[in-house]
Image (cartoon, rainbow, N blue to C red):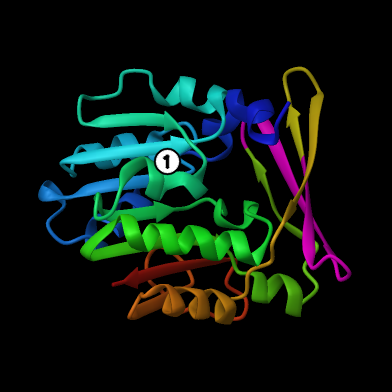
Amino acid sequence: MSFYHSIAKYYRDIFPLQPVQAHFVRESITDPAKSALLDVGCGTGDLSRELADSFSRVTGIDLDTAMLDFARESAPANLEFFILDMLTIQKRFGEGAFNGVLCFGNTLVHLNAAESIFAFIQQARMVLGSSGKLLLQLINYDRILDQGIQALPTIETDKCSFVRNYQYDKESHLVNFESILTIKSRAESIRNRIPLYPLRQAELRSMLTEAGFSSISCYGNFKKDALKKNSIPLVVEASI
């Protein structure tokens, strides 16, 4: 069973919809009512559904069937979900299909090689229209690597706790991400371990520039506060 398949039932409790994310997207994309949006790694689709109220068309993609089963519940007419590999978006949708592409939730680094990440960025550039934007959110791996961070803050809810441990392996240049989801009502734990590529800000900027993005802004959160060495997330807005 895959990592996300195993936690799909509890995903909304661990990662509830954050209105600040939706506001960031609406503020970034010019004229949302006339714009089409692609949500890459949409999970249970809560952000996609929220944005469908503002955008003319929203498409969510994910590889996990259990996540998409939740996402498809009561989806409005202008919102579609597909099981799709993020490295096939250009083939599936064609050039200029969207005004905005977003990839949040540290999804990008699950492509655990620099070549794969760059391939996605290139495809995102191709499916965007002439004034399109790519919006990204991942962990600030400069902080993880430079400060030797070995864990993110544990997420505690009434139903569960979610422990997130990071172990950097110098030989492979990958971070081994170990999660422990504990269901409080049953004292049951679900453990997962997956490799992630620790993408630094400078490397990401270089990829975006090479792919054809001319304006790149990096922030420390979705409120567009300045990125600092202790910022936990890295939020990026890249324009063609």
Instruction: Classify mark 1: helix, strand or loop.
Output: loop
Q: Nearer the viewer, residue 9 or 80?
A: 80
Magenta region, residue range: 157-179
Residue 143 % position (x, y): 67, 74
Residue at 28% across / 54% down in the picture? 95
Q: Nearer the viewer, residue 139 or 102?
A: 102
Q: In which quadrant of the rendered image does the C terminus lie?
A: bottom left
What residue did someone put label 1 on? 17
Residue 101 in magenta? no
Residue 166 in magenta? yes
Residue at 20% across / 24% down in the picture? 77
Count of numbered tags = 1
Q: Is residue 196 above or below residue 212?
A: above
Q: In which quadrant of the rendered image does the N terminus lie?
A: top right
Residue 175 % position (x, y): 77, 60
Look at the image and tell me whether residue 18 can be seen: no
Q: Is residue 144 above or below residue 57?
A: below
Q: Nearer the viewer, residue 123 or 99?
A: 123
In the image, taking residue 85 as reference, residue 211 lies left or right, namely left
Q: Quadrant of residue 167?
A: bottom right
In the image, taking residue 214 as reference, residue 57 lies left or right, namely left
Residue at 42% across / 40% down in the picture? 17
Residue 25 % position (x, y): 30, 56
The type of residue carrying mark 1 is Leu
Q: Crowdedness of circle 1 by 10 Å Cα count: few (<14), some, many (20+)? A: some
Q: Is residue 206 above or below residue 17?
A: below
Q: Quadrant of residue 91?
A: top left
Q: Is residue 8 above or below residue 54?
A: above
Residue 70 % position (x, y): 46, 22
